[in-house]
Amino acid sequence: MGWPRFSDLHPVTLLFLRKGPNWSAEESETSRQLQIDHLAFLKSIRDGGQAAIVGPMLDDGDLRAACVYLVPIDEALVLAAGDPAVRAGRLVVEAHPWMIEKAALDHRPTKSS
């Protein structure tokens, strides 16, 4: 089968959300509301077509979530800076430009899923 041709690749941004300086495992009304706002933000960028995949890590390590943004890295960083959990310092962003097969984008979840 071999590697895909360069023309079959699409640039995206692979973005990781890690525990930030204000991370705490302690639950409070503030942290619960921040989580609600964070999830609403991620849903909005996915529904808006700026992200294909967003999701949490299932272990309890430093890495909290991974996202595939469908925009260049500079735009992804601006978007991610608007995440309420990032603004609050609960999470920090690590971003990398990445190439994926264009066909992989055909398998993105739809807004109704």
Image (cartoon, rainbow, N blue to C red):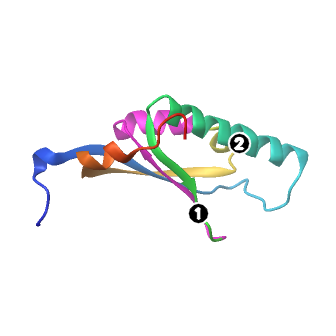
Task: Report if residue 45 lies within the magenta region.
Answer: no
Using a 10 Å C-alpha cutoff, classify the residue at mark 2 as few (fewer than 14 neighbours), some (14 to 19) or many (20 or more): some
Which residue is pictured at 25% across the width and 47% down the height?
103
Q: Position of residue 5 (x, y in %)?
A: 10, 53
Residue sitting at 44 percent across and 33 percent down?
Answer: 50
Can residue 84 be seen by looking at this rendering? no
Q: Position of residue 13 (x, y in %)?
A: 37, 46
Q: Which residues are magenta?
A: 60-82
Instruction: From the viewer's perspective, tell me whether residue 51 is left or right of residue 88.
Output: left
Which secondary structure lies at badge 1? loop
Image point (14%, 56%), residue name: 4
Instruction: Classify residue 29 as left or right of residue 68.
Output: right
Say which amino acid is labelled 2. Answer: Ala
Residue 57 is marked as 1
| Residue nearer the viewer, 104 or 98 | 104
Total marks in image: 2
**Between 111 and 74, which is closer to the camera in this rendering?**
111
Q: Secondary structure at mark 2?
A: loop
Residue 90 or residue 11, whichever sits in front: 11
Between disc 1 and disc 2, whose residue precedes? 1
Disc number at residue 88? Answer: 2
Residue 73 in magenta? Answer: yes
Q: Can residue 79 be seen?
A: yes
